[in-house]
Structure formats: structure tokens, C-alpha cells
Amino acid sequence: MTQLESAKKNIVTPLMRAVASIERLDPSLLMRLMREGKVVIPLNINHKIKKPCAIGSSLSTKVNANIGTSTDESRISDEIEKLKVAINHGADALMDLSVGGDLDKLRRRVLKHSTVPVGTVPVYEVAVRAQERKGNFLKFSADDVLAVLEKQARQGVDFFTVHSGVTCNSLKVLEKNKRLMGIVSRGGAIIASWMKYHKEENPFYSHFDRILDIAYKYDVTLSLGDGLRPGSILDATDKAQIAELKILGSLAKRAWDRSVQVMIEGPGHVPMDQIEKNIALEKKYCFGAPFYVLGPLVTDVAPGYDHITSAIGGAMAASFGADFLCYVTPAEHLRHPSASDVAEGVIASRIAAHAGDLVKRRKVALEWDRNISIARKARDWKKQIRLAIDPKKAKQYRLSSKPKLSNVCTMCGKYCSIKLMEDCLRV
């Protein structure tokens, strides 16, 4: 029985109770939100983890970190290091996006070492296997797709990104409404290329019921991917993006009917004045399903700083109701990320998520800010550092002060406003 199926039967499972406790939420409310499709708990029946998380309405905004090999960088040890860095810096979930090296070996190690839910994009492995076996990454069949999904589900993957909204119809909309950047989703581009090569409908769409069979069997959460997401702010919220979104909404309803958990993936590159509209459209067309956004990046001019452009967009998106932020690292658009890039990306995205939670009036978020403000007023440096979102960096900065450490910082020194007012009010 899946978690959604239990919720439909008014059964509060031990997993629901554990997650509700973390969220400081009544378990029966969490169960109702799951029953309505507004919350998911990604956890495969074959995967044991220490830190399960719920994603969706009335919950804290969660953060995902991507890791994985490329065709140019395929050292498994590097990706496991990134996994540990991401989790140590507070990522709530991980996605293994590997396309290079021994994919099965890496996935097994990721699932073994991860203490948080793990997601994949199965079409990547499908394409890689086709390239290895037939010398052409487009020479795969629907059965090949389903075989990879079954294998990864059996191994314990908690959530799949499936680009089922890239269909003959949505591609026609794209063709009629030209973009600057076209398709920038790697999975979306592979599927669109496959459809043109075979002159067939997307197997992730035409065989969606069989995908649901696999997801139900292992309680894998489906993350319905945005294969037509905009890759430039000039393409944001266009007709192709919305056409795909409407398809994803219809597929979400089919998944719920089969007691399969679903979340919806979203853009992408979006200017600030369109972010609220994007959240509202997803909640409307996808019936309140949890929204998982990449960034969004609010400008295209900051290579090397896209963890910042995405944090700006992520904070806004979270404040308007996005539920799950996929981090972006400083390496985005430039190169394969390093472990330090992963750390910066996670922290930037966590700041965005927390900023959004303050707007959502999440009690835990408000308490966190209140407590660090009290410590700051008291000039309690140890407590400030302990409460910092990145305690290690905060401590390094504090200890790097040239003069001897005192009860003020070297920015204001003897003119510290907090100390001056403390002395003033004491008179």
C-alpha cells in the first residue's frame, strides 16, 4: 500500500507521524493534505533513510541538490564527496543526474550513502544504454524505458523525473511559437529528438499507465518534468511552457487515481515580475500539487553567480507558494560543479527557502530568526554562530578578525551601535 493509498483510507502511517513531528504539524492534517495531492513524502519501500521529508502545502520549503557524473567527469568518488557535502550543508533531497561512467555502481553507492531521499532522471540511463549497445542514444524502445524504470525503482530510487509532457501536441505549440533558446532541458531534448527520429509519441506519455504500475509497486513519487521549461527569461511563461503544464496537470490526476504521489517541476529562467504568475498557474492547472522549481533564475547575465540569481528567484517563488527548490551552483552554464560549488549552491538555496518560509509565516522559521536576533543583541557570538545557516563559515569570519577578539565585531569596533545603545539605555 502506498502512502497516498493509506491517506485515502484515513490511515496515519508511522512515516506520516515522523514527518509531521518534524514539521510540527498535526499528523491528521498531513494525512489530509496527502489525500488531496498537496503533499508528497518521497520514499521508496526499498530505501531506508534517516531523514525523510515531506514536500508541499503548509510545510517548510525543501531544497534539492543535484549531483552526478558527466561524459567528461565521471569519478564516482567525486560524486560521493558532493553527496556528503550537500547533506552536511542541509540539502533535504538529492538527485543523481549521472550520464558518465558506471551508472549502476554510482547509483547503488548514492542510495547507500544518502540519508535523504534520492531522485533520478531515468531517460538519462536509457539514452546512455542505447549509446553503449547500439551506437546511437536514440535507438531505444518503450520497453527499454520501462526496464530502466523498473530496475531503478527496485534499487530504491525515491522519486523519478519523467518528462511526460513533451508530446506531439506540446511540440507543435513550440514549433508555432518560436523561442530564443528552444528546449534546454536535457531530458526534454533527448525525448524530442527521439520522437523526431522514430516519428512516434513520447513513450513517457503513451505508456504512462505502465509507468504508474511501477511507481505504485515501489511507492516511487513521480516528479513530472518540465521538458519545455524556458532557458532564457525572454522565453518565460510562453505558450509551449503552459501547454506542457496543462498536460502535467491531467497526468497528475491520473496518478492520484492510481494512488501514486506526484509533484510538478517548473521553470527555469523567469523574470521577477512573472514568478508569482508561474506559481499561480501551476497551482491552478495542476490542482495544488507540490511545485518543484529550478531556481528560478531571474536574469541570464550572471555566469559564475547563478547561485545568487536562482536564490533571488527561489526566495520569491517560495514566498508565493513553491514547495521545493532545486539548487543552482556557481558553475551553472559553465562547467561540471565541484564540491565547493555544491556547498555554495545548497546554502544559497536554503537561504531562499528560509526567506520564503518567513513570508509563509512558518513558526519554525520565525523562531530561528528571533533566536539569532536575541543572540546578536546580547553579542553572544557562540550562539550566533551556532544558529547561523552555515556555522562553519560564520566561525571562520569571526576568528579571522585581525585585532584581538572582543564583545564587538571589527566592522564598527568601539562604535558598535548595539553596545552604544546598551550603555545609553543603562543610564
Image: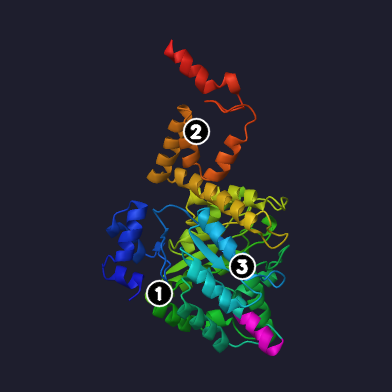
Is residue 19 shown to the viewer in this render? yes
CB within 8 Å, label 2 to label 1: no
Q: Quadrant of the C terminus?
A: top left
Q: Looking at this view, is 155 or 279 the one in front?
A: 155
Query: How far separated are the C-alphas under marks 1 and 3?
Result: 29 Å
Callout 2: 10 Å neighbours few (<14), some, many (20+)? some
Question: Which residue appears at 39% of the width and 74% of the height?
Answer: 45
The magenta stretch spans residue 132:
yes
Image spot of residue 147 (x, y percent) = 53, 86
| Three-letter amino acid code of the residue under disc 1 | Asp
Residue 368 lies in quadrant: top left
Question: Which residue appears at 31% of the width and 68% of the height?
Answer: 7
| Three-letter amino acid code of the residue under disc 3 | Ser
| Residue on which disc 1 sits | 219
Dot label at residue 83: none
Question: Which residue appears at 59% of the width and 40% of the height?
Answer: 396
The residue segment tinted magenta is 126-135
Tell me which secondary structure the magenta stretch mostly adopts: helix
Mark with earlier residue (2, 1): 1
Query: How far separated are the C-alphas under marks 2 and 1?
Result: 45 Å
Callout 1: 10 Å neighbours few (<14), some, many (20+)? many
Callout 3: 10 Å neighbours few (<14), some, many (20+)? few
Image spot of residue 97 (x, y percent) = 60, 69
Query: Mark 1 falls on what kind of element?
Result: loop
Question: Which residue appears at 45% of the width and 36% of the height?
Answer: 383
| Residue on which disc 3 sits | 77
| Three-letter amino acid code of the residue under disc 2 | Trp
Dot label at residue 381: 2
The magenta stretch spans residue 193:
no
